[in-house]
Image (cartoon, rainbow, N blue to C red):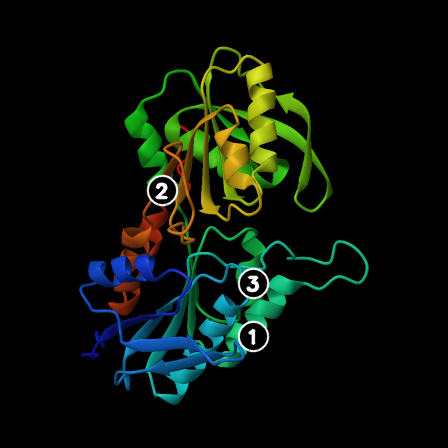
């Protein structure tokens, strides 16, 4: 009989310590003691303070800005490899630099692939991510990759609201697959906002495809950065007769004036997960933060116990009856 290794250890940098602590609690371990600090010139310094030899190590570290978060992840992987961890899994609730995932114009990098190369070269054995900005990023890694989805969390939240005459809206063509799956799961109708983006972080709403008049609306996207797209979509939906407008996204980057824009928009509630740390942001009651700790923690437990992870996706790909 094969002996299964169950010595799970969870370590984290400074990107989202609260989420890492919740994940560790779910898998019934203490966070591994680790120093992640800075030298006086700003360089990152990492030291793991516990024995991790032979451990099934999970490094929880989203790679949103600042770039030091990515550097912390790379150095934690390197430290774990040199400390003889049995298996090193990088858990990235938010995979940063994912928006440059293809060469769509001259003289631009494919940064999502560059980051994948950096993480692989550092010595990781496995990857866990949550709602990648583009699914093809999975192919940038020649490693086992578990891509989790926030759909079970967000869909359950809206089932509990039990909204009548619900329409799920995709704010652009890129989010159509996610919006369609959400509509199927909630038994709702589907509509699409035809959006043009003349330059990064700037969007124009052009047309609405679908009927939202007199109906409750859920705008579903994978991330909210400056909030411009989702707020413009909310205004357009209201102008087309929508009743209450809700918005949901997995990753709340909330850069620039995003919080002020959303607070001043027709959006009734903005649903986000804690894949990115929001503790330093002054969020109003309009924002609802759902924890993804149980989802990620369950994936970690199943991976360590050599069990199937795919059943966690059942609500994500639910088909219409």
Q: Quadrant of residue 235?
A: top right
* Badge 2 element: strand
Decide: is 127 above or below 240: below
In the rendered view, does 288 fall on the left or right side of 75? left
Q: What is the x, y in percent for residue 280?
A: 41, 51
Residue at 60% x, 15% y is: 239
Q: What is the x, y in percent for residue 75?
A: 46, 79
In the rendered view, does 211 fall on the left or right side of 3? right
Q: What is the x, y in percent for residue 244?
A: 45, 19
* Badge 3 element: helix
Give how far apart the Cα atoms at labels 1 and 2 are.
31 Å
- Choose mark 3 or mark 1, whichever is in front: 1
Residue under label 3, please give it: 139
Q: Please report whichever mark, 2 or 3, sits nearer to the chain's N-terminal start.
A: 3
**Residue 35 visible somewhere in the drawing:** yes
Give how far apart the Cα atoms at labels 3 and 1 are.
15 Å
Q: Which mark is residue 78?
A: none
Residue under label 1, please give it: 118
């Amino acid at each position: 009989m094969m002996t299964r290794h169950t010595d799970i250890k969870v370590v984290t940098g400074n990107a989202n310590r609260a989420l890492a602590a919740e994940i560790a609690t779910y898998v019934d371990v203490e966070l591994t003691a680790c120093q992640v600090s800075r030298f006086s010139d700003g360089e990152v310094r990492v030291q793991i303070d516990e024995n991790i030899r032979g451990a099934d190590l999970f490094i929880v570290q989203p790679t949103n800005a600042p770039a030091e978060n990515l550097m912390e992840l790379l150095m934690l992987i390197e430290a774990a490899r040199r400390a003889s961890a049995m298996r090193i899994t990088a858990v990235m609730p938010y995979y940063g630099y994912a928006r440059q995932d293809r060469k769509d114009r001259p003289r631009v990098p494919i940064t999502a692939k560059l980051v994948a190369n950096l993480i692989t070269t550092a010595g990781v054995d496995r990857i866990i991510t949550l709602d990648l900005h583009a699914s093809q990023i999975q192919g940038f890694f020649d490693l086992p990759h578990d891509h989790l989805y926030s759909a079970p969390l967000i869909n359950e939240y809206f089932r509990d609201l039990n909204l009548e005459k619900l329409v799920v809206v995709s704010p652009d063509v890129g989010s159509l697959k996610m919006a369609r799956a959400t509509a199927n799961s909630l038994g709702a109708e589907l509509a699409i906002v035809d959006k043009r983006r003349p330059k990064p972080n700037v969007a124009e709403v052009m047309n609405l495809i679908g009927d939202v008049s007199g109906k409750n609306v859920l705008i579903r996207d994978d991330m909210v950065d400056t909030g411009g797209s989702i707020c413009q979509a909310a205004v357009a939906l209201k102008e087309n007769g929508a009743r209450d407008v809700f918005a949901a996204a997995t990753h709340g980057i909330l850069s620039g004036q995003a919080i002020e824009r959303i607070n001043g928009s027709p959006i009734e509630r903005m649903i986000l997960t804690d894949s990115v740390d929001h503790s330093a942001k002054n969020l109003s009651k309009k924002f609802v933060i759902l924890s993804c700790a149980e989802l990620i923690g369950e994936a970690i437990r199943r991976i360590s116990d050599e069990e199937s992870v795919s059943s966690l996706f059942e609500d994500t790909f639910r088909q219409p009856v």
